Amino acid sequence: MTSHVAHKPSGGTHRRTVALFGGTFDPVHAGHIAVAQAAQRRFHLDTIYFIPSSRPPHKSVRELTAFVHRYTMTALACADHPGFVPSLAEAPVAGAPQHVFYTIDTVRRYHREHPEDHVYFIVGADQFLEIPTWKNYESLLDACDFIIASRPGFRLDALRLVIPPEKFGRSAAPDPNKIVLRKSAVHLLTTVASHVSSTEVRERLARKQGIHGLVPARVEEYILGQALYR
Ligand code: ATP
């Protein structure tokens, strides 16, 4: 599968621990990088795949920046971080420009291609609270472990409310930052609390304000060079 080439392991058959980090990345920003670094440290991730979605189901109201720009910025942001890999898993499909990507399909596809890997999905707390609206979300909760990045003002208890009661499993040693499910687990990443959002970056640029420090330096250079978000 050529569009999935970035998911190919470099060799060997050992069980890798990876995370899929989906988003619109319009643009990728310092909050995304902080979350990925914290997750990489805490869960000893071999690889984090940053997966810009060419067409996510939940963000169709606003016109997204062209995929090629979002992917390029993601690749630039990954360049300085060993283990961060930009993925083309949700790149536009030739002949099907309206193709919408759903997380469950991306996760299942990853499992099919790498059945030996332990897979986490990284998602912000705001997005996880919307999970009941995602395609096949009950199957998705079974399909991988989750790393939830806390966002400012977020309450941990809120996470439990969106999980169907029958999914809960038993945990031998209760951990306030982990929800044990029957087939998976939901982990809370509480060590990062970044206020940055892509919306803020876009709005600052539209107002001709600087974005220094809000996005990685290479991304800032690219945005300014390509005159994006004017
Ligand atoms: P926008 O402002 O356009 O809605 P965003 O900043 O939320 O975008 P996305 O590309 O939609 O960026 O985010 C990808 C994932 O990263 C989502 O799950 C989102 O919740 C999470 N995320 C984004 N920013 C942060 C942050 N500052 N802290 C924690 N999680 C974040």
Image: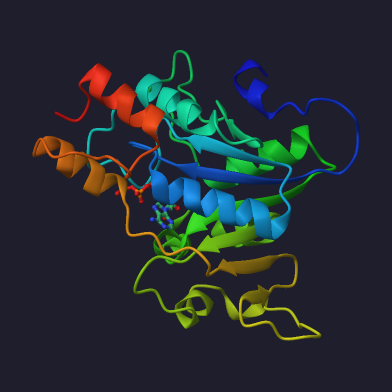
Q: Which residue is rendered at x = 66% and y = 21% of the image?
A: 5
Most extreme residue toward the right, as rendered?
A: 13
In the rendered view, does 104 fall on the left or right side of 205? Answer: right
Query: Which x, y percent locates residue 108?
Result: 68, 42
Query: Which x, y percent locates residue 22?
Result: 50, 43
Q: Which residue is rendered at x = 45% and y = 64% of the image?
A: 125
Give the answer, above or below, for where 58 lies relative to 126: above
* Pick the front one: 63 or 221: 221
Image quadrant holding the N terminus, namely top right
Give the answer, above or below, for where 126 lies relative to 167: above
Q: Is residue 135 visible?
A: no
Give the answer, above or below, for where 228 lies relative to 119: above
Q: Which residue is rendered at x = 54% and y = 63% of the image?
A: 148
Most extreme residue toward the left, as rendered?
A: 207
In the rendered view, does 60 fall on the left or right side of 100? Answer: left
In the rendered view, does 208 fall on the left or right side of 61? Answer: left
* Pick the front one: 22 or 210: 210
